[in-house]
Image (cartoon, rainbow, N blue to C red):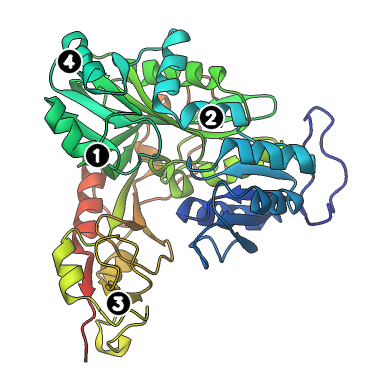
């Protein structure tokens, strides 16, 4: 834990630490931890991460990594001993281990272990939301075939069946019409939750931040999924002002039922009749909030670091319309596994010099679980188009293994600040944003959100992961 250098924190902020000099311990070292470390550095805040994968994506820019499993009490205790506050960037983190480590080291855990226990279990999360009077799809817990048959009778067919724990990026979810479908998708039914299938007009997200003495929400984001994986976002969402206000109101109510400081990602459905339903909650920065790096006054990552340390939170106003495209690993699994390097040593069999000028080689041990002797090694192509595109930013996550649909990076396309109306700038309790966003160097008319999405699609479609073959 770094010595604190900047004197006492504000008297009005409980258990805040001073900056520069503070250290945040993060359980998880993926891209969210990486971007949190990037955001913390200008504030003089250091990040130490705990992750089971050596040389995880967060290191660098994180100061240090402790290698350990997410339920490793000894590793968690070591992390707590080096930090002024503990937080998470992945729901696989064990709340009990975090609680014990924080208590033993005398450092706060945010969000609280109670909140982490609730949101990591989708059935507990739904029950908590419903008990608070928040709108959610109809649901029931499922542990066997009889439970599922009852769910079909109560909720209709088909159903969305989810694993109570561990699901993300399309994993642990399936649309089912029969017990056979469910058993094929999950193997066994114990520990699942059935939800009525929602007819929605679009999916939305609101990033919220709970600080020491205030709660704020960012503007409403529209999210575009394929096969349950987030592909694109656009902010502001392409919906009515009434729906946006309703979404922010519901998101604010969600934040009030949670304990602990930090950033939360609140996933929502806008139904075909204009109502808002809560889908899921993430107790951490969220993929749908990546636009805040270029598009908002304060990024969600800086906001999270500020909040967990008890520092004043920043502005949430939108600087400019913004679209984000996720850069996913090659969707052609056979192509990677058939043509990738099979030497098993984690090194490229081909020469990087033989790859296109804008190619970066991604290598590393395979963890697909499909073929333990296979090391998918690939070059990424198409980054030059991103780097030369106007009003566009490129973020690479530093992952060394390419797997189908794995999030390898993202790009952000921004519009003009002047294209925003006051109702688009932030939450409905915030002051109107100052027009501080970038001006387009394209010329011509202002791009609308649909045009920004189209630009993002063109650039993401140009990115390919080409297998590096034996020479």
Q: Position of residue 109 (x, y in %)?
A: 67, 37
Q: Nearer the viewer, residue 187 or 317?
A: 187
The image shows residue 140, relative to residue 163, as above or below, that is above
Task: Give the residue number, with chain letter if any, for mark 4.
Answer: 152
- Nearest-to-viewer mark from 4 and 1: 4
Alpha carbon distance from label 3 to label 1: 30 Å
Which labelled disc corresponds to residue 15? none
Label 4 to label 1: alpha-carbon separation: 22 Å
Residue at the limit of the structure toward the right, as seen here? 7
Specify whether 106 is left or right of 86: right
Q: Earlier in the sequence, mark 3 or mark 2?
A: 2
The answer to which of 69 and 115 lies nearer the viewer is 69
Under circle 3, the secondary element is: loop
Give the mark nearest the N terminus, 1 or 2.
2
Question: Would residue 324 be found to the left or right of residue 213 on screen?
Answer: left
Q: CA distance from mark 3 to mark 2?
A: 44 Å
């Amino acid at each position: 834990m770094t010595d604190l250098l900047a004197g006492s924190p504000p008297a009005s902020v409980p258990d805040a630490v001073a900056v520069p000099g503070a250290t945040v311990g993060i359980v998880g070292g993926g891209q969210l931890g990486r971007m949190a470390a990037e955001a913390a550095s200008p504030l003089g805040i250091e990040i130490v991460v705990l992750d089971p994968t050596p040389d995880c994506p967060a290191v660098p820019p994180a100061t240090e990594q402790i290698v350990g499993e997410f339920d490793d009490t000894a590793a968690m205790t070591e992390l707590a001993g080096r930090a002024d506050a503990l937080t998470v960037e992945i729901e696989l983190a064990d709340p009990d281990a975090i609680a014990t480590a924080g208590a033993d080291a005398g450092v706060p855990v945010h969000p609280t272990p109670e909140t982490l226990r609730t949101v990591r279990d989708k059935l507990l999360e739904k029950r908590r939301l419903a008990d608070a009077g928040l709108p959610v799809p109809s649901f029931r817990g499922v542990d066997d075939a009889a439970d599922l048959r009852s769910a079909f009778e109560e909720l209709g067919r088909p159903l969305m069946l989810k694993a109570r724990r561990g699901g993300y990026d399309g994993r642990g979810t399936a649309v089912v019409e029969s017990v056979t479908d469910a058993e094929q998708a999950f193997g066994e039914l114990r520990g699942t939750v059935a939800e009525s299938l929602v007819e929605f007009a679009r999916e939305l997200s609101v990033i919220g931040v709970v600080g020491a003495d205030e709660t704020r929400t960012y503007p409403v984001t529209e999210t575009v999924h394929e096969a349950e994986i987030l592909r694109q976002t656009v902010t502001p969402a392409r919906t009515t002002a009434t729906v946006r206000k309703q979404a922010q109101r519901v998101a604010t109510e969600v934040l009030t039922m949670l304990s602990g400081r930090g950033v939360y990602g609140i996933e929502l459905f806008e139904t075909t009749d204009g109502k808002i339903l809560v889908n899921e909650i993430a107790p951490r920065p969220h993929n749908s909030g990546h636009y805040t790096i270029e598009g908002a006054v304060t990024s969600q990552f800086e906001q999270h670091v500020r909040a967990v340390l008890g520092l004043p939170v920043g502005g949430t106003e939108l600087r400019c319309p913004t679209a984000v495209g996720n850069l996913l690993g090659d969707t052609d699994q056979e192509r990677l596994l058939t043509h990738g390097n099979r030497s098993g040593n984690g090194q490229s069999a081909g020469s990087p010099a033989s790859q296109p000028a804008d190619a970066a080689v991604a290598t590393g041990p395979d963890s697909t679980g499909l073929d333990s002797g296979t090391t998918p090694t690939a070059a990424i192509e198409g980054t030059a188009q991103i780097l030369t595109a106007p009003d566009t930013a490129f973020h690479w996550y530093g992952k060394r293994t390419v797997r189908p649909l794995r999030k390898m990076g993202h790009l952000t396309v921004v519009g003009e600040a002047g294209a925003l109306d006051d109702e688009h700038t932030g939450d409905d309790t915030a002051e109107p944003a100052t027009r501080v966003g970038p001006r387009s160097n394209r010329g011509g008319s202002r791009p609308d959100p649909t045009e920004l999405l189209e630009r993002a699609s063109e650039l993401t479609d140009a990115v390919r992961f080409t297998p590096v073959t034996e020479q």
